[in-house]
Image: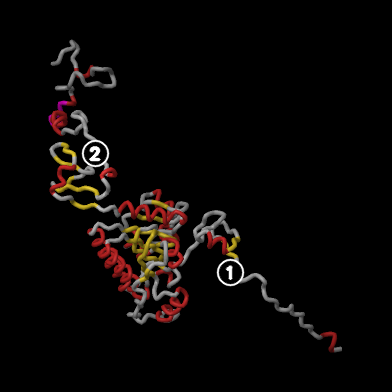
Amino acid sequence: MAWFRKDHAPLQPPERESRVPEGLWIKCGSCKEILYRKEVVQNLSVCTKCSFHFRISARERLGMLFDTAPEEFDSALVSSDPLVFRDTKPYATRLKDGKDKTNSWDALVSTVGVMDGLRVVIAAMEYGFIGGSMGVVVGEKVTRAIERAEAARLPLIVVSCSGGARMMEGTLSLMQMAKISAALARLDDAGLPFLSVLTDPTTGGVTASYAMLGDFHIAEPGALICFAGPRVIQQTIREQLPEGFQRAEYLLAHGMIDMVVHRHKLRETLSRICSLLMVPVAPSKSADRTKGKRMNGQTYVNGRSVEGTLIESRKAPEQVIEPEVLGPNERFDAARLEPREQMHRDGAHRDGAHRDPAHKDDDGPTSKRSLPKDGHHS
């Protein structure tokens, strides 16, 4: 009969909404621990188990560094899509999606504000906007931030988090490397500090330009810092790379960066370095020449004299470190080296001629090699 061969559809379970809200938990990328997102955010987006540093947005970064809400400038700059580029989707669509995702028109937020009582200019890159790639707008905003710091005599801090130059703008994006480097040269000529903060990841054309042109290079723990990534290098050279290759700690051990700072200590470190580098120094008036000590025929205040112009600190007199006066035997005298250099030029040191009998060697108080057998000089 037909009812014996009838296929019965399985019972569908009733649909139930999850009681756990979306995004309540987060998985650590290092120790793989499941963490309560709220606790991670309160810990400055650092894993509470292994101190893994999660990637954060530019505005979160600025909120961690400034004392109060900073003043944002050049926020209305937008790319004009000069090449009318299209891959899987039009470049104009990608710009719009990036704006909806990050609430920024491009991959950099430039601000000026107060950090630990010191006024600074900070530009932070936004990785959520097309991978933090550097295009014409990013290059222009970084250049304007440099010029603002130079005009206002403020220290400059740039927080890099980027995949490199933006391919959708072709050669125009590569030109930003030279433009920013030239602006940083003018900032250096003005005697103002530039601190480069390297976060995960800092790669490509950003690493090849302003990210590695700072007076200080400060990286977060575990940050990937490179031009070409480790996978590309390994496939090219066909060799196994060292453990931790191109990570912040590896670069610190090989002298590529100055320090690796935990995110909890980053604000304190930046403010301390800026305070040290921004100590005002100015040439004194001619009437102040009597304040310094005279050493070797020159007047020194705080230990420096440049081309006869006295340089002194504007700090209180009790905070100025005066140089210690050296005794006659402690001073360097080039004339003392002339006889020995003459000996080396004549080659007399090879046979012991003209050797000082009072010279001490390892053999005793008087060198036996400098005296003949009868004990007298030849």
Quadrant of the image occupied by residue 113: bottom left
* Outermost residue to the right: 1
Could you say which disc has been placed on residue 23 in the image? Answer: 1
Tell me which secondary structure the magenta stretch mostly adopts: helix
Range drawn in magenta: 344-348
Where does the image place residue 12, in percent across and percent down from the top left?
74, 79
Using the image, determine if residue 104 lies above or below residue 277. below
Q: Kindly identify the residue that appears in the image at 60 percent across and 65 percent down.
A: 25
Q: Is residue 212 left or right of residue 324?
A: right
Query: Who is closer to the viewer here, 261 or 8?
Result: 261
Could you say which disc has been placed on residue 323 in the image? Answer: 2
Q: Is residue 99 left or right of residue 314?
A: right
Where does the image place residue 322, in percent across and percent down from the top left?
24, 40
Quadrant of the image occupied by residue 19: bottom right
Split into 4 quadrants, where in the image is the C terminus?
top left
Query: Who is closer to the viewer here, 312 or 94?
Result: 312
Q: Disc 1 residue type?
A: Gly
Q: Is residue 1 visible?
A: yes
Task: Determine if the magenta segment contains residue 346.
Answer: yes
Q: Disc 2 residue type?
A: Pro
